[in-house]
Amino acid sequence: MMTINKYYVLVPQALQTPIHQDSDVASEKEAQRQQMVKQAQQQGGL
């Protein structure tokens, strides 16, 4: 999250770190989901 003012840009470091961790977890879950979809397609699923 970024707060923009006409005088300065504030990017709180306390908020930056958890966002990156969440995106790493989300991308890992997305990779697992894609792998499961591919596996289901190979087995003749949907």
Image (tube, grey):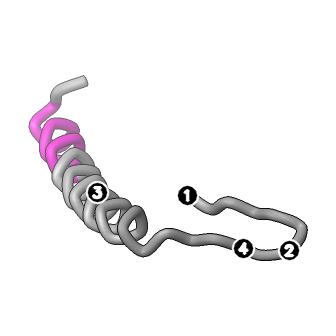
Q: Nearer the viewer, mark 3 or mark 2?
A: 2
> Residue 23's spot in the image, x, y percent?
34, 60
Give the distance between the C-alpha atoms of the residues marked 3 and 2, in whole angstroms: 30 Å
Q: Is residue 10 above or below residue 32?
A: below
> Residue 19's spot in the image, x, y percent?
37, 60
Magenta segment range? 35-44
Q: Is residue 5 above or below residue 34?
A: below
Identify which residue is drawn at 16% across, 31% down: 44
The quadrant the C terminus occupies is top left
Task: Report which residue position mark 4 lands on.
Answer: 9
Lateral position of residue 13 relative to residue 43, left or right = right
Element type where label 2 sits in the image: loop
Residue type highlighted by circle 4? Val
Task: Report which residue position mark 2 lands on.
Answer: 7
Identify which residue is drawn at 57% across, 71% down: 11
Q: Earlier in the sequence, mark 3 or mark 1?
A: 1
Dot 3 crowding, Cα within 10 Å, few <14, some 14–19, many 20+: few
Identify which residue is drawn at 76% across, 63% down: 4
Residue type highlighted by circle 3? Asp
Q: Nearer the viewer, mark 4 or mark 2?
A: 2
